Image (tube, helix red, strand yellow):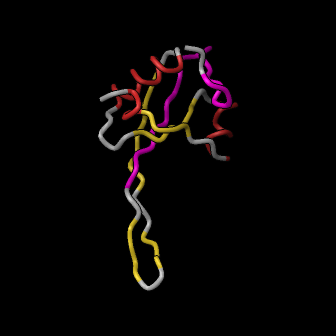
Amino acid sequence: MQLSDTLLRPLITEKTTSHLGTEQTYAFEVGLKANKLQIAAAIEEYYGVRVARVRTQIVRGKTKRFGRHTGKRSNWKKAYVTLVTGDTINLYEAPSA
């Protein structure tokens, strides 16, 4: 898998930003077929940090109404990445390559 297929976007929500102060945990939306080793390698390559732990979960798509019809949004995968003590990621500016 390529880097763009593994990491889709960082998730910046109230819950994920509250974890930044106490833990070194960041949340990302990742590809459905990406495994933990690929996610850790992609984070280390893109942001230049060391990853201590990766936890993943598949978020089930919601059933929504589209006019008279019902449909289902696609499932997607979320990854919680914990960094080694001392490493940080600034999600609000682009990394220097």
Q: Which residue is more in the foreground, 36 or 34?
A: 34
What secondary structure is the stretch in magenta mostly built from?
loop
Quick check: 45 left or right of 16?
left
Q: Which residue is more in the foreground, 36 or 9?
A: 9
Residue occupying the point 38% across, 72% down? 71
**Residue 86 forms part of the magenta stretch:** yes
Write down the quadrant of residue 97 in the picture. top right
Residue occupying the point 68% across, 40% down? 18
In x, y percent, where is residue 64? 46, 72
Residue occupying the point 38% across, 49% down? 58
Q: Which residue is more in the foreground, 30 or 26?
A: 30
Q: What is the span of residues highlighted in magenta in the rendered image?
A: 75-94
In x, y percent, where is residue 28? 50, 38
Quick check: 47 left or right of 39?
right
In x, y percent, where is residue 48? 52, 14
Quick check: 96 left or right of 75?
right
Is the residue 51 above or below the residue 13 in the image? above
